[in-house]
Image: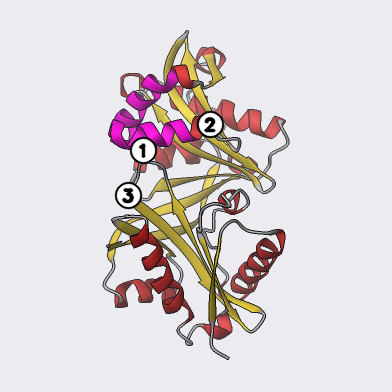
Amino acid sequence: MPIQIEQRFGLTEQDLTMIRQLEQQCLKADLFPLKLNWDMLESRDSGVGDDFLAFDGESLVGFVGLYAFPGSETIEVSGMVHPDCRQNGVFRLLAERVKAEALSRGAEELLYICPSASIGAIGYAKSRKLQYTHTEHLMRYDSTAAAIGTGDSPSSEESIALIPASKSDLARLIDLMQDGFGMSELLSRPYLESTLESTTDHTYMAHYKGEPIGTIRLMKDTHGAGIFGFVVDSAHRGRGLGRAILKQTVSTLIAEGYTNLWLEVNAVNDQALRLYESCGFRPVSSFEYYSQRL
């Protein structure tokens, strides 16, 4: 029976269960994690066809999810194929549907997320002559590894106030995205407007002595909490304030009952890596990103 590819507009509980089971089958065989962004899968927009499922009869043998962000003409792609079906052209069929969908949306680039430990995923990207762009580390919080006596002045952490961001903070957030990530207002404005309206994203302004000197965004779900979009104004770096903000964020999340905390960082960002490690985060896996121009 030929492989059937089905596009989903929103994922049902049955879909999510099948995807979780397939993920566990891949994890058992490969021994490395995938990046499927479960917080996004569990809150898909029923009006957008972001997910493609590959079936062999009634069995799910492949999955690919699209992850688009407001204001960006790049769509990130992540997926998996059942270990017993990887020589059957399943991912090729999924990739063809993904490309067609991206073109229909007017996207200019697909960015494939490949586990660094996956010979198959990296091999596929190279065989298709996709362009390597960068590597990111996934880091998880380990309470036993949290550094003690990192040099923060007691007054720094006590003076940090994390305040939920509102639309009135938009201009300052745009400035911080430019300062921290080099994002133009054209890209950052729709992205920030979307996150401020989200029910799953929680954006905070970090105030030091009454001045908004940074921002941090949290995504909380049943699996834990992810830390994203962490920026300290360049004029206030090198004073231990970033560490104080991150420590306070971690302490707050743990107090709320979240024990599985994670973040992502570019593998060449040594300064950020040192900061995160000093606060108890440790690399657990890496992902390489490959670009397909459309």
Above-or-below relation of 168 to 183: above
In terms of secondary structure, what is the magenta stretch mainly? helix
Report which residue position mark 2 lands on. 197
Above-or-below relation of 215 to 207: below
Mark 2 is on which residue type?
Glu
Q: Which residues are magenta?
A: 169-194
**Camera-nearest residue between 264 and 46:** 46
The quadrant of the picture occupied by the N terminus is: bottom right
Mark 1 is on which residue type?
Gln
Q: Is residue 146 left or right of residue 254?
A: left
Residue shown at 38%/71% (left/top)? 122
Report which residue position mark 3 lands on. 73
Residue shown at 30%/28% (left/top)? 179
Question: Which quadrant holds residue 60?
Answer: bottom right
Neighbours of disc 3 within 10 Å: few (<14), some (14-19), many (20+): some
Q: Secondary structure at mark 1?
A: helix
Residue shown at 30%/75% (left/top)? 128
Mark found first going from the N terminus, 1 or 2: 2
Report which residue position mark 1 lands on. 271
Which colour assignment does the render follow? secondary structure
Q: Position of residue 126 (x, y in %)?
A: 30, 73
Mark 3 is on which residue type?
Glu
Neighbours of disc 1 within 10 Å: few (<14), some (14-19), many (20+): few
Q: Is residue 204 left or right of residue 269?
A: right
**Camera-nearest residue between 63 and 281:** 63
Mark found first going from the N terminus, 1 or 3: 3
Q: Secondary structure at mark 3?
A: loop
